[in-house]
Every structure is written in structure tokens, then in C-alpha cells.
Image (cartoon, rainbow, N blue to C red):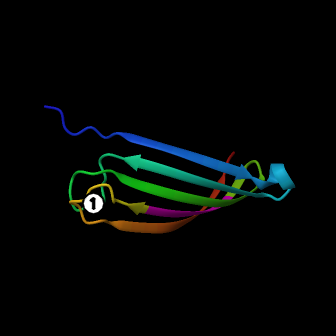
Amino acid sequence: MLGPVDLRSGADQDFDAGAAWGVPVGAALAYRRTSLPVMTTTDNGDASETILRLAYNGRPDFLIALDIMGVVNRENAQATAVWAGGVVFSLRYYF
């Protein structure tokens, strides 16, 4: 017997101010949707998530980023909307 199938889709767009204006800052906006949301009061209805990233990208091997995330489930009229969000600060060094 097969369980529920999780369908996911998403898109993102990013901008590098370093390439455009010589400022070592980047920004990205992403959207993701899933058919099996974890944070909902019922087990049906899609959930969507939006992420905004602001980052220092002056070096190719080092990244400092601030991610602002929001999750909401509004696609099911029978479910109580669950709103969640958070902020993540990350340092990444690539070697």
C-alpha cells in the first residue's frame, strides 16, 4: 500500500550587487510549496514557505548570510492556518 505522495515545487531569484555596482552584498528571494505540510492542523492542503536571504559575498570562499523565513498554510479552508517564521544567521567557509 502506498502512502501519500509529497509533491514539491519552488522558485528563487538572486541578485549580486558586487557584479552590478561593486558592493559585496547579495540578496535572494525563494518560494517553496509542498503538498504534505508538516505544520498544519489537518493532513491535507498545501503549505508554502518564503525565504529572503541577505548576504556578504565579497570573497568566493566565504559567505555571511541572514535568512528570514516564513511558513504559512492557507490553501485548505478546513484547516486552521499555522504561521511560523524564523531568522537564521550563517557563516560558511568553502575549502
Instruction: Give the extent of the magenta segment.
Output: 64-70
Kindly identify the residue that appears in the image at 59 percent across and 54 percent down.
29
Answer with left or right where residue 45 lies relative to residue 94. Answer: left
Please state which of residues 63 and 87 is positioned toward the viewer in this rendering. 87
Question: Dot 1: few (<14), some (14–19), or many (≥20) neighbours within 10 Å?
Answer: many
> Could you tell me which quadrant the N terminus lies in?
top left
Is residue 66 in the magenta section? yes
Measured as percent of width and height from the top left, residue 31 is found at 50, 51
Q: Residue furthest left?
A: 1
Please state which of residues 91 and 11 is positioned toward the viewer in this rendering. 11
> Could you tell me which quadrant the C terminus lies in?
top right
The vertical placement of 27 against 10, above or below, is below
Place residue 64 in its image quadrant: bottom right
Measured as percent of width and height from the top left, residue 2 is found at 17, 33
Circle 1: residue type: Thr
- Magenta stretch secondary structure, dominant: strand
Answer with left or right where residue 86 lies relative to residue 21. Answer: left
Measured as percent of width and height from the top left, residue 58 is found at 79, 55
